[in-house]
Image (tube, helix red, strand yellow):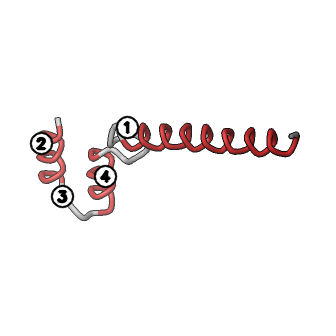
Amino acid sequence: MEISLLIMVLFWGIVFGFIIWLVFRLTRQNAPANSGQRNLLDIARERYVRGEINKNQFEQLKKDLA
């Protein structure tokens, strides 16, 4: 009797743990795309600093992103 109770508790613990993990996973996928990622304006600034784009291109990008 004690072993079957232990197995039942473990089973339901695993089921509930999986459900909580699944809900967490699904809600994290629907998070805003910008969370934790670099901002597009930051990327444009970095490209400007590295010389990949000139000042006019950078200013245009700022206008486009605003």
Residue 47, how many percent across, how many down? Answer: 28, 58
Residue that mark 2 sits on: 64
N-terminal of the pair, mark 1 or mark 2, is 1
Classify 10 Å Cα crowding around label 1: few (below 14), some (14-19), many (20 and above).
few
Residue in the picture at 43% in, 40% down: 28
| Front position among marks 3 and 1 | 1
Apparent side of residue 63 relative to residue 50 in the rendered image (left or right): left
Cα gap from disc 1 to disc 2, whole angstroms = 24 Å
| Amino acid type shown at disc 2 | Asp
Q: Residue at x 27, y 56 (%)?
A: 48
Tags 1 and 4 touching, CB below 8 Å: no
Helix, strand or loop at mark 3:
loop
Question: Quadrant location of the N terminus?
Answer: top right
Q: Which residue is mark 1?
A: 31
Label 4: which residue?
Answer: 43
Of the pair 14 and 25, the residue shown nearer to us: 14
Number of the front mark, 3 or 4:
4
Residue 54 falls left or right of residue 26: left
On the image, the x and y values in percent for residue 59 come to: 15, 45
Tag 3 and tag 1, C-beta contact below 8 Å: no
Q: Residue furthest front?
A: 1
Residue closest to the eye, 10 or 29: 10
Cα separation between marks 3 and 4: 14 Å
